[in-house]
Amino acid sequence: METSKFDIADYLDSKEMIAEYLNTVLEEGDNNDIIIAIGHIAKAIGMTKISEETGLSRPSLYKALSEGSKPQFATIMKVLKAIGGQIQVNPISG
């Protein structure tokens, strides 16, 4: 029996799935988890398309969205816009 490596990008096939995935990571993850999740989403959509929409090269995107990277906030905002996301702040209840 042969197994293949699990790749979350294979399952991010709708705007709803992408939003649910990113919102879950934003709630439960740390900075590195969020950067990696954005990278998974960019991969699912297509790095070439994200590159064209952000004006960033594909190698720069892969580097900025890899584990342990510390991309600039402007880069994250460009990629979020390109993947169809936005940041929204809601008051914390409690």
Image (spheres, helix red, strand yellow):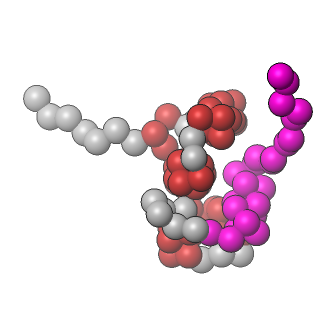
Q: Residue at x 65, y 34 (%)?
A: 27
Whole-percent x, y for residue 42 in the image:
59, 54
Can you tell which quarter of the image residue 61 is in?
bottom right
Q: Residue at x 10, y 29 (%)?
A: 1
Residue 18 seen in this snapshot:
no
**Image vertical order of residue 80 relative to residue 89, above or below:** below
The answer to whether residue 25 is left or right of residue 8 is right
Q: Is residue 82 magenta?
A: yes
Q: Residue at x 49, y 34 (%)?
A: 11
**Image vertical order of residue 32 relative to residue 12, above or below:** below
The answer to whether residue 32 is left or right of residue 5 is right
Whole-percent x, y for residue 71 in the image:
62, 69
**Image vertical order of residue 67 relative to residue 27, above or below:** below
Foreground of the two, 71 or 38: 71
Foreground of the two, 37 or 9: 37
The residue positioned farthest toward the left in the image shown: 1
* Image quadrant containing the C terminus: top right
Q: Residue at x 34, y 38 (%)?
A: 6
Q: Is residue 45 magenta?
A: no
Can you tell which quarter of the image residue 51 is in?
bottom right
Whole-percent x, y for residue 29 in the image:
57, 41
Foreground of the two, 47 or 40: 40
Q: The magenta stretch spans which residues?
A: 71-94
**Image vertical order of residue 78 relative to residue 34, above or below:** below
The residue positioned farthest toward the top in the image shown: 94
Whole-percent x, y for residue 30 in the image:
57, 47
The residue positioned farthest toward the front in the image shown: 94
Residue 88 seen in this snapshot:
yes
Circle count = 0
